[in-house]
Image: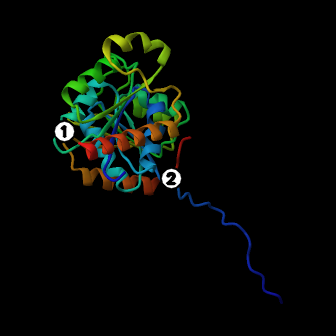
Amino acid sequence: MDNHCVMLIESDLVIRTPLAQYLRDCGFRVVEAFNAEEARIVLAQADLTIDTVFLDADMPEESGFAFAAWMRANHPGVEVILAGSVEKTAAKAGELCKEGPAISKPYDHKIVLDEIRRRIAARARNMDES
Amino acid sequence: MISQKSTAKPDVEIDASPKHVLVVDDDIVIRLLIAEVMRDEGICVIEARSGEDAAGYLKSGGRADLIFSDIQMPGSIDGLQLARYVRETYPSIPVILTSGGIIPQGLNGVVKFVSKPFRLNSVLELVLETLNAAGGAANG
């Protein structure tokens, strides 16, 4: 996972911190953001390349679905993994985003790790085929 | 006389786990830079964007060996209020405050202060020095 950078967008520090630490222990570089506004500031940093964004679908102020749609339009090369409370947000999924949350809360760190690795492997396969 | 190997345990256990520093700043770029430079030194950094976030982390039993906090932050708890709360509730945790404004009065040497803009290496040196002086006192 050399240099693979994951941005975690999660407003709850108590949820975000241990997940970020777990992913760092697994060899990822991890950037933590509180909300979509902070995430956009991070994405604008010229010296920082984000490979994967893991975000809560139920973020404060701006929904994760809307942010995921914005990511697809503005940063199509970045993998986006939606997570969060499926029941609460499923209704919004259809109108805002083609994919619903892949992982629900409370986060199982190993499942998050596996999903990130799965996305990286799928992307690598797609690049090989193209 | 038969010599015996001492099997007594040392009086003081050495805590080899990484130090935990709670970084509190509402500016994500500053938070990110400080956090990265500390992590490169093997420090476990907890990032909070407000005084409420930081206080909530401490109340939940989260470990902090040192707190590095901006003073001017949105919300109901600014850096000075956070420092007072920590001094009263977790007196063993050292606090370093930072600000781009005028040096606040009333710190009375209880907390350290760094003016913004600062050099990251200077902050890191101060953090390491403070952690060493505190000898690993921790919350959580």
- In this rendering, which labeled residue sits more in front, label 1 or label 2? 1
Instruction: State the image coordinates of residue B48 (x, y, percent, origin top left).
Output: 38, 33
Same-chain check, marks 1 and 2: no
Percent position of residue A69, x then y: 27, 21
Q: Position of residue A103 (x, y in %)?
A: 47, 28
Please tell me which residue lies in front, A92 or A122. A122
Question: Residue B72 placed where, x, y %?
Answer: 28, 29
Q: Is residue A76 above or below residue B16?
A: above
* Residue B118 can be seen in this image: yes
Is residue B46 among the parts visible in the rendering?
A: no
Image quadrant where one finds the C terminus of chain B: top right
- Which residue is rendered at x = 53% and y = 59% of the image? B16
Question: Could you tell me the amino acid type at mark 2?
Answer: Gly
Residue B107: quarter of image: top left
Which residue position holds label 2?
B136
Three-letter amino acid code at the position of disc 1: Gln
Q: Which residue is mark 1?
A: A45
Chain letter, disc 1 residue: A
- Pick whichever, A71 or B83, lies toward us: A71
In the image as oriented, which residue stretches furthest toward the bottom?
B1
Q: Chain of mark 2?
A: B
Q: Quadrant of the N terminus of chain B?
A: bottom right
SS at mark 1 in the image? loop
Disc 1: CA contacts within 10 A as few (<14), some (14-19) or many (>=20): few
Residue drawn at point x = 25 percent, y = 39 percent: B30
Structural distance between the alpha carbons of marks 1 and 2: 35 Å
Using residue A5 as the reference point, say whether residue A18 is left or right of it. right
